[in-house]
Amino acid sequence: MKLATVTIEGKEMAAVVSDDHVTLIQTINEYEDKNWSPDLFDLLQNDQLSEMVSWYQNEGQNKLHQFPSFLAEEVQFAPLYRQPRKIWGVGMNYMEKALELSGQPPEEEPVIFMKPDTSLIGPEESIKLPAQSKEVTAEAELAMIIGKTCKNIEEGAAPSYVAGFTTSLDMTAKDIHAKNPRFMQRSKSFDTFFSFGPYLISADEYQDIKTINVETILNGEVAHRNVVANMMYQPWYIISFFSQIMTLSPGDVIMTGTPGSVVIRNGDIVECRINGFKALRNPVLGTHS
């Protein structure tokens, strides 16, 4: 099942996407006598996603075309939600990327960092280049959305705690980070330096996540491409790893690493493309080019 948040008359509302049509959850509630939250973050918090997926698989997909809807190409997509409790990233998770940046074999444990929710934007919102940096990069990444609270779980149990996947873009002030590796958190934390959406695809849609292909796109051209199978730390391991550190909560976002970064300048368009998803696309706005 594909979920999204769309802007209707100035209000951001959760919806189901099927066959290029967007049906508001509010509309489904009215026609099906359901009480699912019309806010995607609240839907996850209230543990309603599994019930929705079951309804969709058993009858809902066939019913949706009977309900009032919008064409996907005609609606404005928003980020899935605005204030997740945690946004985490994993750095240098593809062998090729790790060797490019460090020239060394991978560490025994993932390199991790956190993003503030003030860095969050959604599809078509502008990435704003900060005055403090002259070299900002963007990286396309597969992101995982936590669906259930978990702590100290084993890798094999991780799939049952994941609501689904989404496309994301992680921005970095590369010149700041280059001054000193200890500046990584600062370099990742500027406003508009994290974008995600427009779709959340539920985990049941993927029988083998290792076949997921991730592309970093700059101005319509593929700059980097790789497949999840080539990750050094696989998604379920990443969930387990983070759960050993902290309690993960519904709605938490974890980026899984990028096949490669691109330097972005004023006027550029950067995208994350992943098979099965609508591309995540953001224009770049800044005072330097």
Image (cartoon, grey):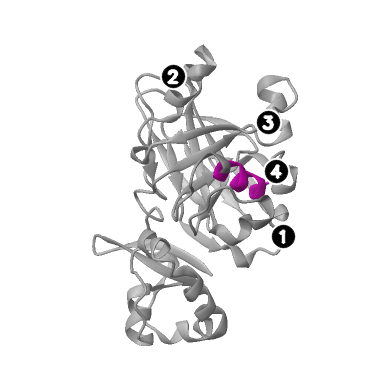
Q: Which residue is mark 1?
A: 208
Around disc 3, counting alpha carbons within 10 Å, would you say few (fewer than 14), some (14 to 19), or many (20 or more)? some
Around disc 1, counting alpha carbons within 10 Å, would you say few (fewer than 14), some (14 to 19), or many (20 or more)? few
Measured as percent of width and height from the top left, residue 285 is found at: 37, 34
Residue 67 or residue 209, whichever sits in front: 209
* Secondary structure state at the residue bearing disc 4: strand
- Distance (Cα) linking label 4 and label 3: 10 Å
Q: Amino acid at mark 4?
A: Asn
The earlier-in-sequence mark between 3 and 2 is 3
Q: Which residue is mark 2?
A: 134
Q: Is residue 239 left or right of residue 12?
A: right
Q: Amino acid at mark 3?
A: Lys
The earlier-in-sequence mark between 1 and 3 is 3
Asked which quadrant contains residue 81, the reply is: bottom left
Q: Which residue is mark 4?
A: 226
The earlier-in-sequence mark between 2 and 1 is 2
* Secondary structure state at the residue bearing disc 2: loop
Q: Residue furthest top?
A: 179
Q: Residue at x 68, y 20 (%)?
A: 102
Q: Main secondary structure of the magenta part?
A: helix
